[in-house]
Amino acid sequence: MNKINIAIDGPASSGKSTVAKILAKNYGYIYTDTGAMYRSVTYLAIQHKISFSDEEGLVDLVERYPISFEQTVAGQKVFVAGQEVTEAIRQNDVTNGVSEVSAWSGVREKLVEVQKEIAKNGGVVMDGRDIGTAVLPNAEVKIFLVASVLERAERRFKENQAAGIATDFETLKKEIEQRDYLDSTREVSPLKQAKDAFLVDTTGLSIAEVVKRIEEIVEHKQALIK
Ligand code: DC
């Protein structure tokens, strides 16, 4: 079977990373969480006191601190210049700054270069906002995952609770709406469904149902390109 690339885009907490990880495991593919890369730059900016509005300073951080992933039985770990940041990049200060940081074209150019390199030989499940439109426009399968704001806020609330991060539900909902707005109205590579992407609405669906739906799409594509 040919190794294809699977691009999964969609708004915050639409379930992208959960299903992308399962698909990667089922197909023996590499999972790449591009949101974690933008989060890592935001984390570095906070640590090094670089303003989110300082594009040059942010690009300099990307150049100085390479971001890498390690797959382990416990899940995927994220590192910047060898230091593990897996949990640090999920904290509220990072989450609330990442839309501003990821809007800079200089930052995006550098990270997109790395993302293209990771996927160049196929066999990758990559999730983000611009994978189907800008990073992997030739991906064999493109999925655009959506879910209602209410359900996404509930999911993020549960995830935060499980991770021991204190959050107020209404605040969380507003933050998700704000991030949707910023991510889909920015000038460079805004969150947008690619013309050839399949829309999957996960509202009310279980993770297993979403995975099954995507696997059907993948199998259909595989049959066509065999
Ligand atoms: O998927 P996530 O919530 O971890 O992503 C964090 C932020 O990074 C998101 O608000 C927008 C940005 N992002 C992006 O601009 N492009 C991507 N390919 C992935 C994420």
Image (cartoon, grey):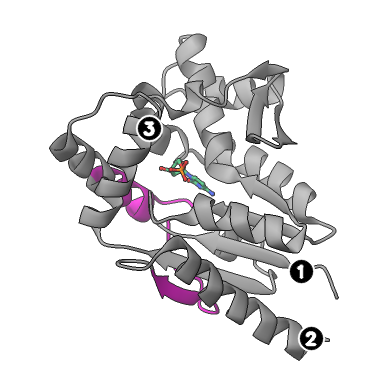
Task: Give the residue displayed 54% in from the left and 18% down from the top.
Answer: 44
How many residues crowd around disc 3 within 10 Å: few (fewer than 14), some, or many (20 or more)? few
Q: Earlier in the sequence, mark 1 or mark 3?
A: 1
Q: Is residue 199 magenta?
A: yes
Q: Is residue 164 magenta?
A: no
Q: Is 185 left or right of 200, judged from the image as shown?
A: left
**Amino acid marked by disc 2:** Ile
**Amino acid marked by disc 1:** Ile
Circle 1 is placed at which residue position?
A: 4
Circle 2 is placed at which residue position?
A: 225
Where's residue 140, x and y in %?
A: 69, 74
**Amino acid marked by disc 3:** Ala
Q: Earlier in the sequence, mark 3 or mark 2?
A: 3
**Residue depth check, mark 3 versus mark 2: number of the one nearer the observer:** 3
Q: Secondary structure at mark 2?
A: helix
Q: Choose top left, top right, bottom left or bottom right for residue 166.
A: top left
How many residues crowd around disc 1 within 10 Å: few (fewer than 14), some, or many (20 or more)? many
**Residue depth check, mark 1 versus mark 3: number of the one nearer the observer:** 3
**Residues at marks 1 and 2 touching, judged by CB atoms closer than 8 Å:** yes
Locate the N terminus by quadrant.
Answer: bottom right
